[in-house]
Structures are given as C-alpha cells and as structure tokens.
Image (cartoon, helix red, strand yellow):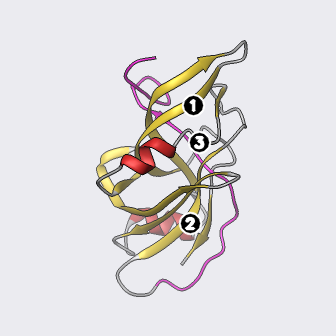
Amino acid sequence: MDGARSHGASADRHRRAPGRIGTAAVSGRTLSIAGYAALFDIPDGAKDVIVPGAFARTLADRQQAIPLYWQHRPEQRIGTVRLAEEDGRGLRVVADIDNPDSRAVSALLAREVNGLSFGYRARGFRRTADGRLLEDIELLEVSLVTHPLQHGARVHFVQ
C-alpha cells in the first residue's frame, strides 16, 4: 500500500507498545519514558503484524531525531525519542518529554495514559488471509496515546 497509514480515517497508521509504569520523582526540566512502541509477531487492532527487522532500514537511515507527539498530533510535539532500537520483543524506545508541567506528564503520572503508538509508512508488506505482514516500515513519529492500536504497546518506565 502506498502512502502513509493511520488509525481511524487519516492516512498514518499508529502502533503502540507494552508494559507497566514504574515512577520516579520528576526532577529537572525533562521527564524520561521507556517502553515499546511496537511488538513483533502480534496482530494489532487492524490485524497487521510487524515482523522482526521491519524497522531496521528506517533506524539505520534516520538523520533526524524522531519526534514524540501527544495523541499523534504534530502540533502537540511533547518531546524527542532519544533511543529507538529493535530487540527480540519489538521496537523499544526511550524518549524525553520537554515540559514536566505539561498535560501529557500529568496524565502519565496519574496513570490516565500509558499507551505508545507510532506513525509510519509501510514500504514493504505481504497480504495474508488475516491482514498484512509489515516487513519494511518507515518510522515517522512516536506518540504517547490513550488507546494504542497494539494493546501491549505501553510505557513501562517513567523517570
């Protein structure tokens, strides 16, 4: 499929990651979060499955920092992903939220939101009887979200 995909009616697809939140005191001017923005080999709500290695090219080629958005809204950039890497489970991310007094941080610390998701373009995929196998993904952004399309895509650490 050409172009960007999205949860809902828009054109970008968003994925989310697993975990439970452990909290530490917020200090300084940034708050760091860690979690999984995507899980391998687990169907999401749209029945897409991400295969290991799907992010390899985009991570190797990336020249600029990956933005961290609130609820996939580009006008609400809340920080920057400082680490994005594939491991045996999925796409692990560590991000810094720039404003510790923001609505996003308040919701995160109150455990009202802990989902992760990502916007992408599918550069390579195969159709299956159940959906798609995503084999090559161009990562556009990571978002802190209320309802991840991939249920297990969650923030698991906050510091």
Of the two numbered discs 1 and 3 on the same chain, state the one appearing first in sequence.
Answer: 3
Query: As displayed, is residue 153 above or below residue 109?
Result: above
User: Residue 22 colored magenta?
Assistant: yes
Asked if the magenta segment contains residue 106, the reply would be no
Q: Amino acid at mark 1?
A: Glu
Relative to 91, is 152 on the left or the right? right
- Contact between marks 2 and 3 (CB within 8 A): the answer is no
Magenta segment main secondary structure: loop
Checking the image for residue 53, the label placed there is 3
- Residues in magenta? 1-26
Residue at the spot of label 1: 135
| Residue 148: quarter of image | top right
Residue at 55 percent of width and 23 percent of height: 125
Q: Are marks 1 and 3 in contact (CB under 8 Å)?
A: yes
Looking at the rendered structure, the kind of residue marked 2 is Ala
The amino acid marked with disc number 3 is Gly
Query: Where is residue 91 drawn, in percent x and y?
Result: 58, 51
Residue 119 x, y percent position in the rendering: 44, 39
Precedes in sequence: disc 2 or disc 3: 2
Q: Residue at x 35, y 60 (%)?
A: 78
Instruction: Give the CA distance from mark 1 to mark 3.
Output: 7 Å
In three-dimensional space, the C-alpha distance between marks 1 and 2, rounded to whole angstroms, equals: 24 Å
Q: Which residue is mark 2?
A: 34
Position of residue 41 in the picture relative to residue 35 (left or right): right
